[in-house]
Image (spheres, rainbow, N blue to C red):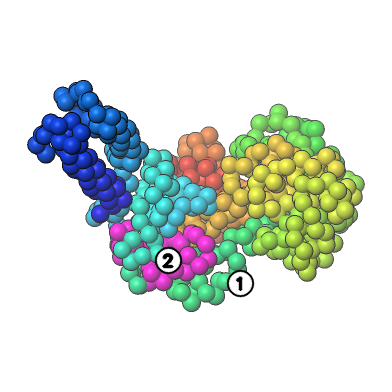
Amino acid sequence: MDTWQRRTLIYVVVLVAVMIGYAAVYDAGMSVFEGTPISYLHALQVVVETFTTTGFGSDAPWSSNEMNVLVIVMDLTGVVLIFLALPVLVFPLFEEAVSTTVPTAAGEELTDHVVICTLTPRGETLVDELDSWGVDHLILEPDRDRAEDLYEEGHDVIHADPQSVDGLKAARLPHARSLVADDSDPVNTSIVLTAKEVAEDVRTVSVVDDPDRERYHRLAGADDVLSPRALLGEGLASKVTTGVSTELGEAIEVGEDFEVAEFPIHRGSDLVGRTIAESGIRERAGANVIGAWFRGQFESPPDPDATLDNGTVLLVSGRENQLERLKDMTMSDVRRFSRGRTVVVGHGEVGGTVSEALSGAGIAHTVVDLHEGESVDVVGDATDPEVLSAAGVEDARSVILALPDDTITEFAILVVRDLNPSIELIARAEQTENVQKMYRAGADYVLSLATVSGRMLASTILEDEEVISLDKQVEVVRTRAPNLVGRTLGEADVRARTGCTVVGVERDGQVVTDLGPEFVVREGDELVIAGTDEGTNRFTETMS
């Protein structure tokens, strides 16, 4: 019996008892005070008419004060009971009638799907990847309201508890290709334990918030344990560690002596204020600009008349010596060989990883956090100008904002930029949708935890796609494209249709990077493409 049924039963029992009681009192009162004996059934009829307001006055007028008072009390009681029925019974019944009915079990036809236990922002990136590949998925959500919201948004979701055997059976886990546990660490281990009980052979992927707890996820039976926060921290730190010298560092190797890299244009670079055509990048460095981020907006290919400024991030391809020359062009003349000091704001999992990476690279840095700690140099609010001044932001070369709250990060960007207009500002975003706001606030480079996490999950689950760049603003993917077989790249017009660039093709164990519009894709070729997450998903949808 559910809550509404139980409430209804209690209400009906109370209503009947009150009416029977009033009927007995009214029957006695008519005999004693009015001297007019009536039957009990007649007394009950009067009470029912009074409570339901369907009739009055059949016995009126009453000569005694006692009976008039009784009738007044009956009237008030009836009104209270009727109005009480509205919020207790009628309104919940109406809400239930018009509310969305979320399924509690998957259809029997669902097979070879991915079971996603609760949907987080990082899971949304995974869902987009699965949709682009045509891979079925099912979300398990234990909270009814959240499940209704997801269902109304068009997601494939059931309202079930992923920590229960019944919930995972309802998701047809024995017929699934894999399970993703994406909640807190204790909940994820519980989900994995339950999954192994329901379907031991199904691959389980667990996301760990605290890398120190990875061991327990594996003890629970997880086949893969992913730690996106640590990778995000390394990615943020790399923007500083590779920016203190002209060494190439974090480029993505596509073929022998051919790489793809993203280069932020630093404040003070002689490229700032020039258009791509005026910059002479091709002539001076020999590298190819295949895309560019302009304040959070990606263009591929970029307009030759687009103006470069600090914060523009170039996506380029070329040989190592070409990329090294281009990197030297993107750096500030004043700070080109100056290591300087870096301020790390936030010392959680991401900030701690950043700090360790900087220490390993021998880069001096100051750590700011709201709470005291062994590695914390300045304690205080990240949005307080005095705290940031005490950390040396005004004289620092760069600052990394590794805060878990996007709203606070956006405000901190404004404060840091006001204190030091020329500082290199690198920020972490919790959700992808907030990246563009951080660019508008003044960040030079923003990396989203949701993006990094989603790419890790997709790369782990999808066997046909290898995500090469997990911790970059752009995604570099190695994949097959059956719809391109027998066609030239010029005929396919990949850039215009998808926003991606084919930077290399692996054929017979060799990577071909000299790709012109006349290059013909053959059966068995693996293409290396570069673009945004949305762009690579469009490529998969149209070319695979």
Residue assigned mark 2:
191
Which residues, given as a range, are shown in magenta?
Answer: 168-196
Q: In the rendered structure, find residue 212 and report the number of the disc placed on it.
A: 1
Relative placement, left or right, of 54 versus 125 is: left
Verify whether residue 331 appears in magenta: no
Q: Quadrant of residue 275?
A: top right
Identify the image quadrant of the N terminus: bottom left
**Against 422, is 320 above or below?**
below
| Residue depicted at 31% across the width and 44% down the height | 101
Relative placement, left or right, of 308 versus 517 is: right
Camera-nearest residue between 503 and 408: 408
Is residue 131 among the parts visible in the rendering?
no
**Against 510, is 63 above or below?**
above
Residue type indicated by callout 1: Asp
Q: Secondary structure at mark 2?
A: helix
Q: Residues within 10 Å of mark 1 (few under 14, many from 20)?
A: few
| Residue depicted at 33% across the width and 69% down the height | 199
Q: Quadrant of residue 353?
A: bottom right
